Image (spheres, helix red, strand yellow):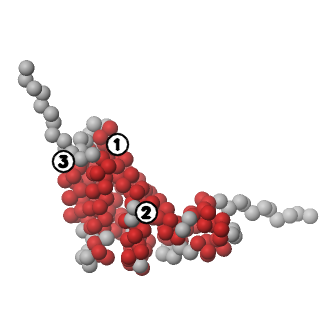
Amino acid sequence: MLTEPARARVTALDAFELARAKWLVGERLDIGKLAEELRVGRATMFRWVGTKEQLYGEVISGAFLQTLEWAKRKSSGQGAAYLTQVTHHLLRALVASQPLRRFVRSDTEWAMRIVMSRESPVEQRVIAAVRSLIDGEVAAGHLAPAMDLESLAYVIVRIAESFLYRDVITGDQPDILTATQAIGLLFTAEKPKTRRKKR
């Protein structure tokens, strides 16, 4: 007698992929429902994804990193000009992201805690990604920032956040142009070149 083929083993990766798919279509992420759909125990699902806050953090930070890679491919040149282009494309894409806008507007206070808190993986990974981006231009000899890279990346992310989420923070519309200009100025600010002493 033929037996039914064994169901493929479900993994943590499947859980995150399902969560990402739900995020993209605007569904709320419910760990219990994810467990039911994947036919695994709730305890297993919690072990894989952590808390609800951690799950949202993973999904959002993953989406950000994908968008950053897209923005890098859309940009050209080198040094400050290249980084400013990346910033512009990235912020435009984030403002246009319907999943992100829906999430932020559904429960603003909680959403801001997810995307801007140091306890969430989102801000940590965003700062690390921005620092890596800048470091690439520094290593190539195209940039000599006036600030240390960790501080520069942190300041850039904070400026971007303040303009990206301005509609829910102050009631004004997101301002990508001003954010890009402000961040571009940070990229163009370079360390003063040391002069050699005359003998």
Question: Residue 120's spot in the image, x, y percent?
Answer: 44, 63
Q: Residue furthest right?
A: 1
Q: CA distance from mark 3 to mark 1?
A: 17 Å
Drawn side of residue 196 relative to residue 120, left or right? left
Residue beneath disc 1:
136
Answer with mark 3 or mark 1, whichever residue precedes in sequence: 1
Question: Residue 7's spot in the image, x, y percent?
Answer: 75, 63
Report the front residue among 185 and 74: 185
Q: CA distance from mark 2 to mark 3?
A: 31 Å
Task: Tell which tag, 1 or 2, sits nearer the viewer.
Answer: 2
Drawn side of residue 57 relative to residue 149, left or right? right
Whether 147 is drawn above or below 197: the answer is below
Whether 55 is drawn above or below 167: the answer is above
Q: What amino acid is labelled 1 in the image?
A: Gly
Whether 195 is drawn above or below 101: the answer is above
Answer with mark 2 or mark 3, whichever residue precedes in sequence: 2
Residue beneath disc 3:
189
Residue beneath the point at 47% across and 64% down? 57
Instruction: Tell me the element at label 2.
Output: loop
What crowding class fits label 1: few (fewer than 14 Cα within 10 Å), some (14-19), or many (20 or more)?
Answer: some
Which label was assigned to residue 102?
none
Answer with mark 1 or mark 2, whichever residue precedes in sequence: 2
Q: What amino acid is labelled 2 in the image?
A: Glu
Q: What amino acid is labelled 3 in the image?
A: Ala
Residue beneath disc 2:
119
Q: Is residue 38 visible?
A: no
What crowding class fits label 2: few (fewer than 14 Cα within 10 Å), some (14-19), or many (20 or more)?
Answer: some
Question: Residue 77's spot in the image, x, y percent?
Answer: 28, 45
Q: Residue furthest left?
A: 198
Q: Is residue 194 visible?
A: yes
